[in-house]
Amino acid sequence: MQHETMTPHQAFFAVMLFNFGSSLIMGINTKLIQQSWMAMLLGALLAVPLFLMYARILTLFPGKDLFEIARELFGRIGGKVIAVLFTWYSIHLAALVIRDFSEFTEITALPETPQLPIMILLMLTSVYLARSDARAIGKWSVIMVFVILLVIFLTFTLSIDEVSLDDIFPLFEYSPAQVAQASFEVFSFPYAESVVFLCLGGAFAKKTKPYKTFLLALLAIHLVFWLVFLRNITLLGPAMMETHFFSSFAAVRIVAVGNFAARIEGSVSSNFLLSGIAKIAVCLLAGAKGLASLFGLKSHKTMVLPAGMLALALCNILYQSFMESIAFLEYYAYYAFPFQVFIPLAVFIAGEIRSRRQASGEQSIGNAPQSPEPST
Amino acid sequence: MWFFLTIFLFLSVIPIDYFTLVKKVSTWEKAVYFSLMLASFSILVLHSLSVPVPSPTDAIISVLDALLHINK
C-alpha cells in the first residue's frame, strides 16, 4: 500500500500540476483583459475557504476517499448516488481536457491532422500513468512542475525586451458585476476542480497535512498564474490578448533573441502536454475509483482503461467545433458548482456533525461516575 | 478510416490489459470491465461512421438555460 500513496511533497506538486492543466495555455480568464489580475485574485480568495473545506474533509477521514466517506456518512444508497455523480464529473473533466489538447494541437501545430489519433495517444499515456497509481503521478508531478517553472522563467526572461508595461493599464476598467462574474469563472476553472483530489483521499500518505498542502499549492498556483498573465498581457497587449484563444502560445510566439532563440512556442506546448497528462491521469484515477466503488469491486486498477476509453468516447461527441467548447465555458462554472461546492459541503457538514457527536459521546463516557469496585 | 483505427485501438489494448490485470479478477469484475468497454466502443464506432450521437454538452446547456436562464 505504501508504494501507492503520495508523499506530502508529491501531493503538493500534484495539486499544482493538476491546476496548471489546460489553464497555462488557455490563459486564465481573459474576458477582463487587463483586469484579469483582479479576477484571478478574487477567484483565488474564493478558493481559500473551499480548499480549507476539502482539507478538513481529508483530515476528518484520513486514508479514505470521497466514495468511502459518502458511504459511511449517507449509507449505501447515498454513497452510490455520490459515486455516480463524481464518476461522471471525473470522466467528463478528463474528456474536456483531452478535447482542449486535441483542439490546441490542431489549431496551432497540426491543422491537417485529425484529432482522433492525438486524443488516443494522450489518453493511452494518461491511462498508463493512472494505472501506475498515485505515487507515479506524484513523482511525475514533482519533475514536471520544475520543467514547467523553468520554461515559464526562460520565456519571461527572454521576452524582457519585448515587454510593454503600459499594456497593463487601465487597472480598473470593468464594472464590479463583470469582475464578480469573471472571478466566479476563475474560481470554478481551474481552482475548484481540485475537488477531484477528494476522490484520491486514500492516495495521500498518512503524514500529509492537507491544510498545508492545499493552501501552499493554491498560493504557488496563483503566483504562477499571475506571472503567466503578466507575461502574456505585456507581450501581446489588450487587443491581441482578446482575440487569441491560446494567449500563452501567442505571447511566446513573438519572443526572439537574435537568430538563435526563436520559435520557442514549442516549449509552451510541451507545458500544456506535461500538465495535461497529469490532470487527465488524476481524473481517470478518480473515475476508476468511482467505478470500483459503484460496482463494488475490490480493486480500481482494472477500471482505469475503461474510464479512459469512456473519456475518449465522450471527448469525441462533446462538441462539433472549437467555438462550441468556448461557448460551453460560460456554462461550465454553473454546471460544475454542485460537484465543486454543494456535494463537498454536504459531506463536510455531515462529517462535522458525526465527529462532534463522537467527541461528545467520548466525553460523556469519560465524565460518567466510575462504578464502585466490586468487593472481593 | 476512423472505424478501422477504433477497431485497431480496442484490439490492441484489450489483450494487453486482459493478460496483465483483468485475467486474475472475478467474473463480476470482468463483466463490468467488458460492459464499459463495449459502451465506449459503441460510441466511438457510431461516431466514426458519422452516425449522430447525442452530446451531453447540449443536455447540460439545455438544463442550465432552463433553470438559470444563463444566455437569455
Image (cartoon, coloured by chain):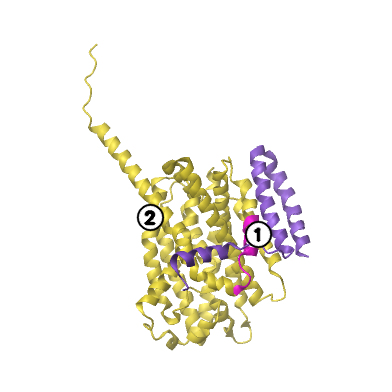
Question: Mark 2 falls within which chain?
Answer: A
Q: Main secondary structure of the magenta part?
A: helix
- Is B40 above or below relative to A149? above
Q: Which chain is purple?
A: B
Three-letter amino acid code of the residue under disc 1? Ala
**Res. A160 in view:** no
Residue A68 lies left or right of residue A49; in this view the side is right
Establish if A249 lies above or below A283: below
Tell me the SS state at disc 1: helix
What percent of the width, then of the height, locates residue A278? 57, 60
The magenta-colored residue range is A309-322
State which quadrant residue A187 falls in. bottom left
Chain ID for label 1? A
Numbered circle sitting on residue A53: 2
Which chain is depicted yellow? A
Q: Residue at x 40, y 58 (%)?
A: A51
Q: Which numbered dot is residue A313?
A: 1
Which image quadrant: the N terminus of chain B?
bottom right
Left or right: A115, with A84 as reference point: right
Mark 2 to mark 1: distance in Å?
33 Å
On the rendered structure, is A37 left or right of B49?
Answer: left
- Is the residue A219 above or below the residue A128 in the image? below
Which residue sits furthest top? Answer: A376
Q: Is residue A311 magenta?
A: yes
Residue in view at x 55 percent, y 61 percent:
A93
Is residue A368 among the parts visible in the rendering? yes
Q: Residues within 10 Å of mark 1 (few under 14, many from 20)?
A: many
Front-most of A360 and A333?
A333
For badge 2, the amino acid type reads: Met
x 70%, y 48%: residue: B17
